Image: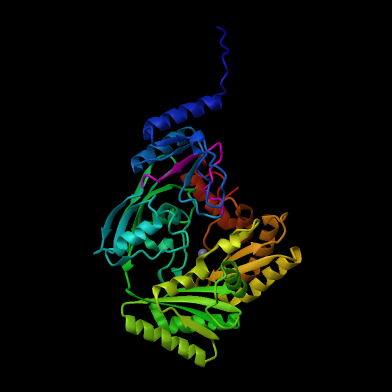
Amino acid sequence: MISEQKVECMQCHKTKELLKALAATVGPTGLLASDALVSRATSVWNPKPMAALALIRPKSTAEVSAVLRLCHQASQNVVIVGGGTGPVAGAEPSSESIAISLERMNRIEDIDPVNASCVVQAGTCLQNVQEAVAAYQLLFPLDLGARGSCTIGGNIATNAGGINVLRYGSMRGLVLGLEAVLPDGTVISSMGRLLKNNAGFDLKQLFIGTEGTLGVVTRAVLRLFPKQSARQTAMIAFSSFEQVADFLQLAKLKLGATLSAFEAMWQSYIEEQLRFYQRRSPFMDRHAFYVLIETEGADEELNKLALNETLELALGKGIIADAVVAKSDQERQRLWDLREDLEPFVRNKPFFGYDVGVPIGDMPAYVGIVEANLRHRWPNSVCHTMGHIADGNLHFFIQPGDVDAFKVDCDEDVYGPLKQFGGTISAEHGIGFEKRSWLLRNRSAEEVALMRSLKKALDPKGILNRGCVFE
Ligand code: ZN
């Protein structure tokens, strides 16, 4: 028998040894080999099978720590994957990386009504947290379209915002305590429940919004609020953006802290929804802008009265053109469907999505420039615009109407004009791999240098999500 000894390269040997050690750490069900990943999509936006040397599924913080220590020793690139709903390719492993999923760390460990907080593991789905705390008359206010599949760890890594930031702030303010594992395996546990803690640096902020580049979030203490039983939802129509901005001011003044959502939609956004689903418009006439607002309060009658008075006042002042108030949960859902259903905008490829931030007063001028840029580049293009405008956040869903269109060109048209308005290339989704080349054009050289210094200090070997945020 002739046996041909294959000379194994050093790197292959090291990888094999690492995979063996990882399998021993997390056990047979904790490691999915690369060939077992064929049925797993890379992300919601990238249907290609996940490419990775292996997908590691630790069951505990201790296992995450042991896994990272091994990867650190081997200088092995690691990508943490969550619910896969992030649209900037920020958590997409390559065939040379080890993927880690916290899908087996998905427990809600504790709900504490007295301290208005809960302790959750990072792999827990957002909707599960919302539903679990609701049973205690409590509210976890982070909410977004992907609530049914995104995870708390992903929400933290991207400092998720969504539809209630106006009232409750983004993830940065909703995390009271946090546990994270550094790339070398060190566990940093700051699982306090206190609203105020100025004992030194607020270290948890290092891991919120840094897109899995500085550490792996394993558990968190989340801030909860009383669940308000009275909710009012209305869709309001406007003939100009100036009216929308005036109404936002009036609504903040008259509705105070009960105002929880203010979602603005441009005419083409609503009309594409109505056309695609053959739905009837809530209004008799066409209007230039629409806003979905929601208030949440303790008293049904007072809540209703405040909204009706605000709408009447605005009508009397000529700020709004028309309004409909939802009279049932079904009507409320129909109004929210008009805002949240993205299928009409994303089904035709190519489509390009954006989450820019611009001061409200500058939105009409900025959107006008973007639309003109797009028309000039692609005469058949359509730009559907909506925004959590009270947060200065706009979303564009752009269909170039040209199968050969490239996103880099679209980026130029959308991001290019931001600087003159002091805008940001990302209000919500982060930088990921998609916006890296724009980071230096949007933030100063000094700011980016400081970000790099932090990365180097926490991850000297650069093993965590290599290439994400920075080239
Ligand atoms: Zn959004």
x and y, in percent, of residue 165 in the image: 45, 68
Dominant SS type (magenta):
loop
Q: Residue at x 44, y 70 (%)?
A: 333
Q: Is residue 460 visible?
A: no
Classify residue 226 by image quadrant: bottom left
- The answer to which of 160 and 281 lies nearer the viewer is 281
Specify whether 190 is left or right of 35.
Answer: left
x and y, in percent, of residue 172 in the image: 42, 61
Residue occupying the far bottom of the picture:
316
- Residue 30 lies within the magenta run: no
Look at the image and give the residue range highlighted in magenta. Answer: 88-105
- The answer to which of 338 and 284 lies nearer the viewer is 284
Residue occupying the far top of the picture:
1
Q: How is the image coloured?
A: rainbow
Q: Residue at x 62, y 68 (%)?
A: 384
Classify residue 29 by image quadrant: top left
Q: Is residue 64 visible?
A: yes
Q: Residue at x 46, y 30 (%)?
A: 18
Residue occupying the far left of the picture:
114
- Residue 104 lies within the magenta run: yes
x and y, in percent, of residue 167 in the image: 41, 72
- The answer to which of 467 and 406 lies nearer the viewer is 406
Is residue 224 placed above or below 459 in the rendered structure?
below
Is residue 304 placed above or below 342 in the rendered structure?
below
Is residue 424 placed above or below 309 in the rendered structure?
above
x and y, in percent, of residue 145 in the image: 47, 62
Q: Quadrant of the N terminus?
A: top right
Q: Residue at x 62, y 71 (%)?
A: 421
